[in-house]
Image (spheres, rainbow, N blue to C red):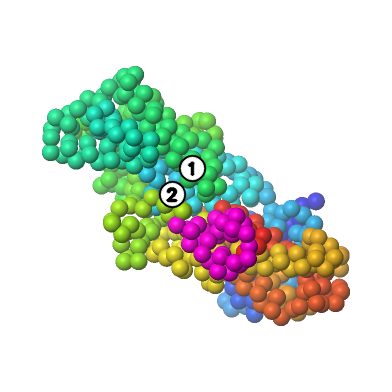
Amino acid sequence: MLHKLIESRLQIAVAAALPGAAVGTVLVRPCPDPKFGDYQTNALMALAKERKLNPRAFAADIAARLDLGNLCAKVEVAGPGFLNFHLQPAAIVRALQGAISSERLFYQPAATPRTVVVDFSSPNVAKPMHVGHIRSTILGDCLARTLRLLGHRVITDNHLGDWGTQFGKLIVGWKHHLDAAALVRDPVAEMERLYRWVNQASGTDPAVLEAARQELVKLQDGDAENLGIWRQMQALSQHQFDTVYGRLGVRFDHTLGESFYNPRLKGVVEDLIARGIARESEGAQVVFFDDDSELKNHPAIVQKSDGAANYATTDLATLAYRIETWHPDEIIYVTDGRQQLHFKQIFAALHRWRPEARVTLAHVWFGSILGGDGKPFKTRSGDTIKLADLLDEAEERALRVVTEKSPDLPEAERREIARVIGLGAIKYQDLLPNRQSDYVFQWDKMLALNGNTAPYLQYAYTRIRSIFRKLADSGGGAGSAGDTTALELAAPPEFRLARHLLNFGLTLETVAAEYRPNYLCNYLYELAGHFTDFYENCPVLKADEPARSHRLALCDLTARVLKQGLDALGIETPERM
Ligand code: ARG
């Protein structure tokens, strides 16, 4: 049988006492301040207003009619018409027991699973993956993991920038200036050098620019030699991307880059024209948004005056393909904030082009990563920082932290722990801030064992694991807790920890609904805090039975939630540090 979450049971009970109100409108949330109770709803205030009733009287009337079974010790009307619920300790215990005996920790699989496409990472061929792509990769991966955990059908798609005018210049460079040895040593750096060289030369020499234009036309017309060069550049880049994804533990169900949609672009433009959505303007084909106050002055070009399609055309073709192929309920695009206008245009164009499409489109955008000087994060010499170098440095710095902490561990083990900590620190630093704000990249802060960091949470996890190692060493059973059939919570820190555990599912749902992993970061940080408070005040291994078993059960649940929560963030957990 499905174990229903406490908040959904409260929600259903309140809705049942409210004839005519839909369950979905009655949100029940944990009390912001536990002083006032465990859960709270403010839904009655809006309803009272709607029905022209006194909100406090209305709330009291509903409270009196609630059928809550044995869930609550009391229900209070508070403030201008809140209902505050105080749980029965037994209800908390039942929820804990449900989690002890199940894989699923305080969350329910979605009642109606959605098909969600997550478009993220999407770096560009022949260019290094830089820190700008790190946020998309880390955020997108976390959202995909969280949605999957909640039971949705997730399709991840890496929309590589593998087509476009830059290839004209790259092919000129490849044919005339390629340094074969450099290509073997560091293929992406060599391609970048070629591009820079030709780009610069075409600024001063019209003949180079013309040559690039001709190579591009040949590539687009399917010239075998140029296609061959383009495929090599693609393969070399993909290899570099795969190395980074492998290190980050990120995988894609599909990698359908821009080139995949190339054969469809003409049809898209023709269809837009035929339906009167695009029209000619100064030789280009343009979609105007006259009825849209925001986009009125921002028409979208879908075919340039030279006949070429562009980024917008490709994204419309991509949308049509995804809708036809996967029938998604939702498509999430994870890119930096500079693409906001682009996605507003694409979404608005789709609504006119496919008015029947019932798909939710979300642009999940983020701010920049800044250096210590408050400017975009660069190397000392002013170059963009390459993602692979950044990951190397994170692992090296983490190795110093681990070596200082545990000098006696064998080197191979220290390196493996450093890998998990270094990569976790980078990811967590990226997921913790509100994604729309810029943040300053700070090595010391992200690797600190104290504070709201990945190493702190990983360390909290290893501390709990060490309790169970000690237990096993003393012959007290290898893994988790003993008899918890009559689980009892007595001390206030036990209650606080238990109550916080219950909110894991709600937190995951908020992350998925608002596309904001920072909620999960903060939830886990608070969980580690509640655990510390519990552990400092309630002896575990030294306690007498049955308290010992019950406290071990709380330890085990905390470790499992920490591990699963970090996993949803894309962060691994070491067994010791
Ligand atoms: N390649 C693009 C960039 O590096 C991101 C693509 C995002 N996805 C999309 N469907 N437009 O900025």
User: Where is 165 relative to 366, above or below?
Assistant: above
User: Where is 295 relative to 453, above or below?
Assistant: above
Q: Earlier in the sequence, mark 2 or mark 1?
A: 1
Amino acid type, callout 2: Ala
Q: Are marks 2 and 1 in contact (CB under 8 Å)?
A: yes
Q: Quadrant of residue 220?
A: top left
Look at the image and tell me in which quarter the C terminus lies: bottom right
Q: In which quarter of the image is residue 408?
A: bottom right
Residue placed at 38% from the left, 35% from the top? Answer: 184
Residue 282 screen position, x and y as percent: 18, 33
The foreground one among 246 and 389 is 389
Query: Which span is picked out in magenta?
Result: 393-422
CA distance for labels 2 and 1: 9 Å
Amino acid type, callout 1: Thr
Residue placed at 81% from the left, 60% from the top? Answer: 478
Question: Quick check: 34 left or right of 487?
Answer: left
Q: Mark 2 points at which residue?
A: 388
Identify the disc placed on residue 157.
Answer: none
The foreground one among 417 and 510 is 417
Is 378 one of the magenta-colored residues? no
Question: Quick check: 317 left or right of 64?
Answer: left
Is 404 one of the magenta-colored residues? yes
Q: Mark 1 points at which residue?
A: 243
Residue placed at 39% from the left, 28% from the top? Answer: 231
